[in-house]
Amino acid sequence: MTEIVAIVNQKGGVGKTTTAWNLGVVLTQQGYRGLLIDLDAQGGLTAFLGLDPYQSERSSYSLLMFEQVSLTRTMHMFGSGLALVPGSIDLATAAVKMTQEEQPLDRLRRVLRSSRVKFDYVFIDTPPTLDVITATSLIAASGVIIPTQTHYLALLGIRNILDTMTRIHQFRNPDLRLLGALATMYDPKAAHAQSILAEMHAVLPGHVFQTVIPYDPQVVDAPHSGKSLMEYAPTSPAALAYRALAGELTSMTNHE
């Protein structure tokens, strides 16, 4: 069964794109089939994989807006096991158009479930807002990962996401569940970092990944080389952490 994971946080710069990309790479290295979907108008995931979000003729925008566009028409393959549905600048207007034109919010869910091309994992990189596009992702998803830095304001953001998830679970997607909050860019020497991490566990008992992604400059350096962190610095602290995270994920989603 395909695990569809929305990676969500209304705050930018918390590691959503990095998490989607590196989890996809790690899992395909382990023999799973993975699909990445870029729903962020900034197109970071698309750019990381060497495509231009300003030049995508068929993109995730096409999937959201046009009933006749299939998943296979938008996919780009990277090796034998990893595919990408690129984002495009058009996504900047998609939320408004979807509301004005009353586009069905479950279109992405239907596309993923009806596709003849099957994947073990789908990772959806969402925009840094709790808008209609993020809602579309949550309606499509079976699980949610919330990457967050260990800052006080990040905990406030988690509560907003949980409220949104509760409403969508109740009214649109009873399969939706929280896989876990993920502490990213963690520096144990930073003021309050350890206490905020402890508070995350207190606020979300049993729903915080044991893996913590450490602050690692090579995470920022890797995209400039055109490589994932797993290829650029496979023994770096963050790379080792993402492998551990992949292990947690496969364990909880019965893909071991």
Image: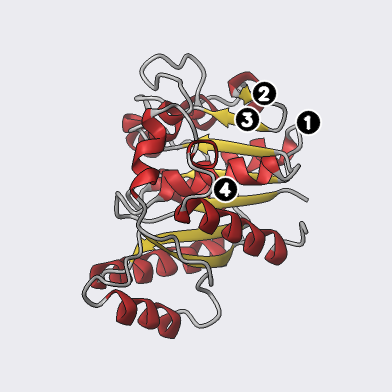
**Which three-letter amino acid code belongs to the residue tagged 3?**
Ala
Residue under pointer 1: 116
Residue 163, position in %: x, y?
Answer: 41, 69
Residue at the farthest left position: 191
Residue 212, position in %: x, y?
Answer: 46, 66
**SS at mark 3 in the image:** strand
Residue under pointer 2: 72
**Which three-letter amino acid code belongs to the residue tagged 2?**
Thr
- Give the CA distance from mark 2 to mark 4: 22 Å
Name which of mark 2 and mark 1 comes first in the sequence. 2
Residue 108 in sight from this viewpoint? yes
Residue count near mark 4 (Cα–Cα under 10 Å), binned few <14, some 14–19, many ≥20 = many
Name which of mark 1 and mark 4 comes first in the sequence. 4
Residue appearing at x 78%, y 51% in the figure: 1
- The mark closer to the camera, 3 or 2, is 3
Residue appearing at x 39%, y 82% in the figure: 198
Name which of mark 3 and mark 2 comes first in the sequence. 2
- Give the CA distance from mark 1 to mark 4: 23 Å
Residue 94, position in %: x, y?
Answer: 38, 32
- The mark closer to the camera, 4 or 3, is 4
**SS at mark 1 in the image:** loop
Residue 83 tag number: 3
- Please tell me in which quadrant of the rendered image residue 155 appears: bottom left
Question: Pointers 4 and 3 in contact (CB under 8 A)?
Answer: no
